[in-house]
Amino acid sequence: MARQKKKKGTSGAVTNYISRTQAVRKLQLTLPDFRRICILKGIYPREPSNNKVKKGVAHRTFYFAKDINYLAHEPLLEKFREMKIFSRKLKKAIAKEQAGKEQSLKHQEPKFKLDHIVRERYPTFVDAVRDLDDCLCMLFLFANFRQTRSVQGEVVAKCKTLCQEFMQYVVLSRSMRKVFLSIKGIYYQADIMGQPVTWIAPYKFASTVPKDVDLKVMGNFVQFYVTLMKFVNFKLFQQIGLAYPPKVKASLAGQDAGLAALKVLPAGAEEEEEAASTAAPQKTVSAKRVASAIAAAVAAADEDHD
Protein backbone atom coordinates (compact mmCIF):
# COMPACT_ATOMS: atom_id res chain seq x y z
CA MET A 1 0.00 0.00 0.00
CA ALA A 2 1.43 3.36 -1.05
CA ARG A 3 2.26 5.82 1.71
CA GLN A 4 0.02 8.87 1.68
CA LYS A 5 1.93 12.04 0.79
CA LYS A 6 1.79 14.84 3.34
CA LYS A 7 0.35 18.12 2.27
CA LYS A 8 2.85 20.98 2.15
CA GLY A 9 2.72 23.33 5.15
CA THR A 10 0.90 20.97 7.53
CA SER A 11 3.85 19.77 9.61
CA GLY A 12 7.33 20.80 10.72
CA ALA A 13 8.74 24.22 11.56
CA VAL A 14 6.52 25.97 9.03
CA THR A 15 3.46 25.41 11.24
CA ASN A 16 4.99 27.58 13.99
CA TYR A 17 4.67 30.72 11.87
CA ILE A 18 1.87 32.56 10.15
CA SER A 19 2.12 35.42 7.67
CA ARG A 20 0.61 38.81 8.37
CA THR A 21 -1.95 38.42 5.57
CA GLN A 22 -3.11 35.09 7.00
CA ALA A 23 -3.29 36.59 10.50
CA VAL A 24 -5.42 39.54 9.34
CA ARG A 25 -7.83 37.17 7.58
CA LYS A 26 -8.03 34.86 10.57
CA LEU A 27 -8.81 37.68 13.02
CA GLN A 28 -11.12 39.45 10.51
CA LEU A 29 -9.48 42.82 11.12
CA THR A 30 -8.25 45.65 8.96
CA LEU A 31 -4.49 46.13 8.76
CA PRO A 32 -4.49 49.30 10.97
CA ASP A 33 -6.55 47.50 13.64
CA PHE A 34 -4.25 44.48 13.45
CA ARG A 35 -1.22 46.71 14.00
CA ARG A 36 -3.00 48.40 16.87
CA ILE A 37 -3.90 45.20 18.72
CA CYS A 38 -0.34 43.87 18.23
CA ILE A 39 1.12 47.05 19.74
CA LEU A 40 -1.24 46.98 22.70
CA LYS A 41 -0.65 43.28 23.40
CA GLY A 42 3.12 43.46 22.84
CA ILE A 43 3.20 41.03 19.90
CA TYR A 44 5.88 41.70 17.30
CA PRO A 45 6.96 40.10 13.97
CA ARG A 46 9.36 37.16 14.15
CA GLU A 47 12.00 36.05 11.71
CA PRO A 48 11.76 32.32 10.96
CA SER A 49 14.95 30.47 11.78
CA ASN A 50 14.20 27.69 9.30
CA ASN A 51 15.30 28.39 5.71
CA LYS A 52 12.35 26.40 4.34
CA VAL A 53 9.94 28.92 5.83
CA LYS A 54 11.83 31.90 4.39
CA LYS A 55 12.39 30.33 0.96
CA GLY A 56 10.83 32.49 -1.74
CA VAL A 57 9.09 34.84 0.75
CA ALA A 58 11.83 37.38 1.47
CA HIS A 59 9.45 40.33 1.79
CA ARG A 60 6.73 38.73 3.92
CA THR A 61 6.18 39.42 7.60
CA PHE A 62 5.72 36.46 9.94
CA TYR A 63 4.29 36.04 13.44
CA PHE A 64 4.21 33.12 15.81
CA ALA A 65 1.03 31.12 15.19
CA LYS A 66 0.52 30.72 18.94
CA ASP A 67 0.53 34.53 19.35
CA ILE A 68 -2.19 34.93 16.73
CA ASN A 69 -4.24 32.17 18.36
CA TYR A 70 -3.82 34.04 21.64
CA LEU A 71 -5.08 37.25 20.02
CA ALA A 72 -8.19 35.49 18.73
CA HIS A 73 -9.61 35.38 22.29
CA GLU A 74 -8.90 39.06 23.08
CA PRO A 75 -12.05 41.01 24.17
CA LEU A 76 -10.73 44.16 22.47
CA LEU A 77 -11.42 42.64 19.04
CA GLU A 78 -15.15 42.96 19.64
CA LYS A 79 -14.66 46.59 20.72
CA PHE A 80 -12.74 47.32 17.52
CA ARG A 81 -15.62 45.93 15.48
CA GLU A 82 -18.10 48.06 17.45
CA MET A 83 -15.96 51.14 16.81
CA LYS A 84 -15.89 50.36 13.09
CA ILE A 85 -19.70 50.14 13.01
CA PHE A 86 -19.97 53.35 15.04
CA SER A 87 -17.63 55.18 12.65
CA ARG A 88 -19.69 54.03 9.66
CA LYS A 89 -22.96 55.23 11.24
CA LEU A 90 -21.44 58.58 12.25
CA LYS A 91 -20.09 59.24 8.75
CA LYS A 92 -23.48 58.40 7.29
CA ALA A 93 -25.27 60.80 9.67
CA ILE A 94 -22.79 63.59 8.88
CA ALA A 95 -23.15 63.04 5.13
CA LYS A 96 -26.97 63.24 5.39
CA GLU A 97 -26.71 66.32 7.66
CA GLN A 98 -28.73 64.67 10.43
CA ALA A 99 -27.58 66.85 13.33
CA GLY A 100 -29.81 65.21 15.95
CA LYS A 101 -28.70 61.70 15.07
CA GLU A 102 -25.08 62.84 14.93
CA GLN A 103 -25.20 64.22 18.50
CA SER A 104 -26.98 61.09 19.71
CA LEU A 105 -24.32 58.85 18.18
CA LYS A 106 -21.46 60.85 19.69
CA HIS A 107 -22.87 60.13 23.16
CA GLN A 108 -22.94 56.40 22.33
CA GLU A 109 -19.32 56.14 21.18
CA PRO A 110 -17.88 52.78 22.33
CA LYS A 111 -14.94 53.04 24.73
CA PHE A 112 -12.52 50.47 26.10
CA LYS A 113 -9.95 50.18 28.86
CA LEU A 114 -6.47 48.67 28.78
CA ASP A 115 -6.19 47.79 32.47
CA HIS A 116 -6.36 44.03 31.88
CA ILE A 117 -3.60 44.24 29.24
CA VAL A 118 -1.27 46.04 31.67
CA ARG A 119 -1.85 43.31 34.26
CA GLU A 120 -1.23 40.61 31.64
CA ARG A 121 2.02 42.08 30.34
CA TYR A 122 3.40 43.00 33.77
CA PRO A 123 2.53 40.39 36.42
CA THR A 124 4.64 42.20 39.06
CA PHE A 125 5.33 45.87 39.67
CA VAL A 126 9.08 45.41 39.22
CA ASP A 127 8.43 44.15 35.66
CA ALA A 128 6.63 47.40 34.89
CA VAL A 129 9.47 49.49 36.37
CA ARG A 130 12.03 47.65 34.20
CA ASP A 131 10.04 48.57 31.08
CA LEU A 132 9.64 52.28 31.91
CA ASP A 133 12.45 53.54 29.67
CA ASP A 134 10.54 53.57 26.37
CA CYS A 135 7.34 54.58 28.14
CA LEU A 136 8.88 57.72 29.66
CA CYS A 137 10.69 58.69 26.45
CA MET A 138 7.42 58.54 24.49
CA LEU A 139 5.37 60.40 27.10
CA PHE A 140 7.92 63.20 27.50
CA LEU A 141 8.06 63.52 23.71
CA PHE A 142 4.28 63.83 23.31
CA ALA A 143 4.11 66.22 26.28
CA ASN A 144 6.23 68.62 24.21
CA PHE A 145 4.07 68.37 21.07
CA ARG A 146 1.59 70.99 19.98
CA GLN A 147 -1.97 70.12 19.13
CA THR A 148 -2.46 69.06 15.51
CA ARG A 149 -4.90 66.99 13.49
CA SER A 150 -2.93 63.84 14.34
CA VAL A 151 -2.09 64.77 17.96
CA GLN A 152 -5.10 65.62 20.12
CA GLY A 153 -4.77 68.25 22.81
CA GLU A 154 -6.29 65.88 25.37
CA VAL A 155 -3.48 63.35 24.79
CA VAL A 156 -0.81 66.04 25.15
CA ALA A 157 -2.38 67.24 28.43
CA LYS A 158 -2.48 63.67 29.82
CA CYS A 159 1.17 63.06 28.93
CA LYS A 160 2.22 66.35 30.50
CA THR A 161 0.33 65.59 33.73
CA LEU A 162 1.75 62.07 34.05
CA CYS A 163 5.31 63.32 33.42
CA GLN A 164 4.94 66.00 36.08
CA GLU A 165 3.59 63.48 38.59
CA PHE A 166 6.48 61.10 37.91
CA MET A 167 9.06 63.88 38.25
CA GLN A 168 7.38 64.91 41.51
CA TYR A 169 7.91 61.40 42.85
CA VAL A 170 11.56 61.37 41.71
CA VAL A 171 12.20 64.67 43.52
CA LEU A 172 10.42 63.72 46.73
CA SER A 173 11.96 60.24 46.93
CA ARG A 174 15.43 61.53 45.94
CA SER A 175 15.70 58.84 43.30
CA MET A 176 17.57 60.88 40.68
CA ARG A 177 21.10 59.61 40.04
CA LYS A 178 22.38 61.11 36.79
CA VAL A 179 21.49 64.01 34.47
CA PHE A 180 23.19 64.71 31.14
CA LEU A 181 22.57 67.56 28.68
CA SER A 182 22.90 66.66 25.00
CA ILE A 183 21.86 68.01 21.61
CA LYS A 184 18.83 65.68 21.54
CA GLY A 185 17.58 66.70 24.98
CA ILE A 186 18.13 66.04 28.67
CA TYR A 187 18.98 62.48 29.70
CA TYR A 188 17.81 61.40 33.15
CA GLN A 189 18.56 58.28 35.15
CA ALA A 190 16.73 57.41 38.35
CA ASP A 191 16.97 54.47 40.72
CA ILE A 192 13.47 53.13 41.37
CA MET A 193 13.09 50.02 43.51
CA GLY A 194 16.69 49.08 42.73
CA GLN A 195 16.09 49.28 38.96
CA PRO A 196 17.90 51.93 36.84
CA VAL A 197 15.39 53.85 34.70
CA THR A 198 16.80 56.04 31.91
CA TRP A 199 14.84 58.38 29.66
CA ILE A 200 15.28 61.52 27.58
CA ALA A 201 13.18 64.70 27.74
CA PRO A 202 13.31 67.05 24.72
CA TYR A 203 13.99 70.75 25.18
CA LYS A 204 10.92 72.96 25.19
CA PHE A 205 11.45 74.45 21.76
CA ALA A 206 8.99 74.75 18.89
CA SER A 207 8.86 71.26 17.40
CA THR A 208 8.03 70.24 13.84
CA VAL A 209 6.92 66.67 13.17
CA PRO A 210 8.50 65.18 10.01
CA LYS A 211 6.06 64.05 7.34
CA ASP A 212 7.54 60.54 7.16
CA VAL A 213 6.69 59.82 10.82
CA ASP A 214 3.48 57.83 11.33
CA LEU A 215 1.90 59.52 14.35
CA LYS A 216 -1.01 57.07 14.36
CA VAL A 217 1.33 54.19 15.21
CA MET A 218 3.04 56.31 17.86
CA GLY A 219 -0.38 57.23 19.20
CA ASN A 220 -1.17 53.54 19.74
CA PHE A 221 1.96 53.20 21.86
CA VAL A 222 1.05 56.35 23.81
CA GLN A 223 -2.46 55.02 24.48
CA PHE A 224 -0.97 51.98 26.20
CA TYR A 225 1.81 53.92 27.94
CA VAL A 226 -0.69 56.39 29.47
CA THR A 227 -2.56 53.51 31.13
CA LEU A 228 0.70 51.92 32.28
CA MET A 229 2.02 55.19 33.72
CA LYS A 230 -1.16 55.74 35.72
CA PHE A 231 -0.65 52.36 37.42
CA VAL A 232 3.04 53.08 38.05
CA ASN A 233 2.50 56.58 39.45
CA PHE A 234 -0.27 55.36 41.75
CA LYS A 235 1.94 52.59 43.13
CA LEU A 236 4.98 54.86 43.56
CA PHE A 237 3.01 57.53 45.40
CA GLN A 238 1.41 54.86 47.56
CA GLN A 239 4.84 53.46 48.54
CA ILE A 240 6.03 56.80 49.96
CA GLY A 241 2.73 57.44 51.72
CA LEU A 242 1.28 60.15 49.47
CA ALA A 243 -2.20 60.60 48.05
CA TYR A 244 -2.65 60.07 44.32
CA PRO A 245 -3.34 61.90 42.12
CA PRO A 246 -1.80 65.09 43.55
CA LYS A 247 -4.08 68.09 43.38
CA VAL A 248 -3.36 71.10 41.18
CA LYS A 249 -3.19 74.45 42.95
CA ALA A 250 -6.04 76.64 41.77
CA SER A 251 -3.84 79.75 41.65
CA LEU A 252 -1.32 78.07 39.31
CA ALA A 253 -3.71 76.01 37.16
CA GLY A 254 -3.23 76.62 33.45
CA GLN A 255 -0.01 78.62 33.90
CA ASP A 256 2.47 75.83 32.99
CA ALA A 257 4.07 76.16 36.43
CA GLY A 258 5.50 72.63 36.35
CA LEU A 259 6.01 70.86 39.67
CA ALA A 260 5.13 74.02 41.60
CA ALA A 261 1.50 73.60 40.52
CA LEU A 262 1.13 70.18 42.22
CA LYS A 263 -0.11 70.02 45.78
CA VAL A 264 1.20 66.88 47.51
CA LEU A 265 -0.70 65.48 50.51
CA PRO A 266 -0.08 62.44 52.73
CA ALA A 267 -2.30 59.43 52.13
CA GLY A 268 -5.63 59.92 53.89
CA ALA A 269 -5.06 63.64 54.41
CA GLU A 270 -7.37 64.53 51.53
CA GLU A 271 -10.46 63.39 53.43
CA GLU A 272 -9.22 65.11 56.58
CA GLU A 273 -8.66 68.33 54.67
CA GLU A 274 -12.16 68.22 53.18
CA ALA A 275 -13.69 67.60 56.60
CA ALA A 276 -11.58 70.37 58.12
CA SER A 277 -12.53 72.80 55.35
CA THR A 278 -16.23 72.27 56.05
CA ALA A 279 -15.85 72.60 59.82
CA ALA A 280 -13.04 75.18 60.00
CA PRO A 281 -11.85 76.61 56.66
CA GLN A 282 -8.60 77.94 58.15
CA LYS A 283 -7.39 74.45 59.17
CA THR A 284 -5.26 72.72 56.46
CA VAL A 285 -2.62 70.04 56.29
CA SER A 286 0.74 71.56 57.23
CA ALA A 287 3.82 71.31 55.03
CA LYS A 288 5.73 69.97 58.03
CA ARG A 289 3.45 66.94 58.19
CA VAL A 290 3.93 66.25 54.47
CA ALA A 291 7.72 66.50 54.79
CA SER A 292 7.83 64.18 57.79
CA ALA A 293 5.68 61.57 56.04
CA ILE A 294 7.90 61.66 52.94
CA ALA A 295 11.12 61.46 54.99
CA ALA A 296 9.84 58.43 56.91
CA ALA A 297 8.80 56.65 53.70
CA VAL A 298 12.13 57.37 51.97
CA ALA A 299 14.09 56.17 55.01
CA ALA A 300 12.09 52.93 55.09
CA ALA A 301 12.69 52.41 51.35
CA ASP A 302 16.44 52.95 51.79
CA GLU A 303 16.54 50.34 54.58
CA ASP A 304 14.74 47.84 52.33
CA HIS A 305 17.27 48.37 49.52
CA ASP A 306 20.20 47.97 51.93
Image (cartoon, grey):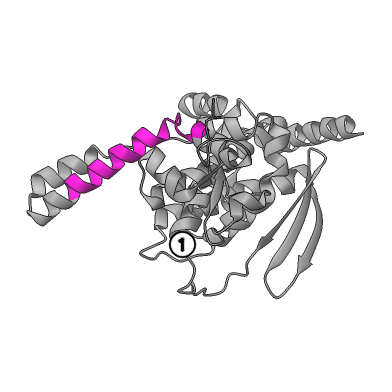
Quarter assignment of residue 109? top left
In the depicted structure, whether residue 65 falls above or below residue 1: below
Q: Is residue 88 magenta?
A: yes
Which quadrant, please, contains the N terminus? top right
Q: Which residue is mark 1?
A: 215
Front-lying residue, 266 or 30 = 30
| Residue 304, horizontal then vertical, whole percent | 86, 30
x 61%, y 46%: residue = 165
Q: Is residue 86 magenta?
A: yes
Magenta span: 69-90
x 41%, y 35%: residue = 76
| Residue 111, horizontal then vertical, whole percent | 35, 37
Front-lying residue, 121 or 10 = 10
Q: Secondary structure at mark 1?
A: helix
Specify whether residue 179 is in view: yes
In the depicted structure, whether residue 266 falls above or below residue 57: above
Q: Is residue 94 left or right of residue 66?
A: left
In the depicted structure, whether residue 216 falls above or below residue 84: below
